[in-house]
Amino acid sequence: MTKDSQTIAVYDAKAAEYAKLVPIDSAPDNELRAFMAEVNVGGRVLDLGCGPGRIAGIMASFGYDVVAIDASEQMIVRARMETGVEARLATFDDVPGLGHFDGIWANFSLLHASHDDYPRHLADIHSALTPNGIFHIALKLGRGTQRDRLGRRYIYRDADTLHADLTSAGFTPFAESRGTDRGLDGTKSDWIAVLSRA
């Protein structure tokens, strides 16, 4: 089971602070625009680890049929209250029961999976996508597993390992971007985002 109670407790306690990282009236960033360019408007999209629902709300405003899930109850409360999207309390383990999607957006969420469960989650995501469905994953760059200063569990991947993970799960990666941002714990981290086709 991937659910990590310590990580979830941090997000429950800091839901309001986390929501400030992505303002409610934000325009789509480059990664979200690239994802939406590949998924037909009106398509069914899963926001896997939606947090306060900001990205799910943006996608819904562009005409996508968005399902948003998160393991943090307080994040789900914020997502429902502030964006009006269909948000539900669920974990990565629940993906197989959610039906099929034209796109799955996993933006800095799967990095909280356990090392052992991560390959299974990628396989479940692949199975949940329609043929040629689009998968966005963003992770912090690095290697190994550790907790941050707030106690959240992270798995890290370098670019080659992430591409190999995706290929092994049946995906065809076709676009990549990188950047550096300051996270909830105040630490700057390098990250990678990859778009793949199922």
Image (cartoon, grey):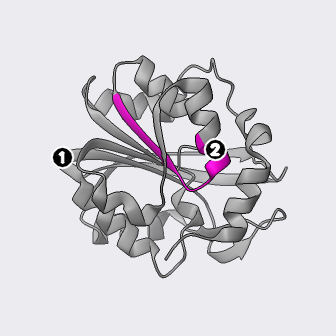
Cβ atoms at labels 1 and 2 below 8 Å apart: no
Q: Earlier in the sequence, mark 1 or mark 2?
A: 2
Q: Which residues are magenta?
A: 65-76
Which residue is at 45% across, 62% downward? 92
| Disc 2 crowd, CA 10 A, few/some/many (<14, 14-19, 20+) | many
Which residue is at 49% across, 35% downward? 31
- In percent of width and height, residue 86 lies at 43, 34
Residue 47 visible, this orientation:
yes
- In percent of width and height, residue 165 lies at 38, 70
* Local secondary structure at mark 2: helix
Residue 52 visible, this orientation:
no
Label 2 is placed on what type of residue?
A: Met
Q: Quadrant of residue 124?
A: bottom left
* Local secondary structure at mark 1: strand
1 over 69 or under it: above or below:
below
- Judging depth in this view, the residue of 85 and 135 nearest the camera is 85
46 over 86 or under it: above or below:
below
Label number found at residue 75: 2
- In percent of width and height, residue 140 lies at 62, 58
Report the residue that reaches farthest toward the bottom.
Answer: 116
Magenta run includes residue 75: yes
Label number found at residue 132: 1
175 over 190 or under it: above or below:
above
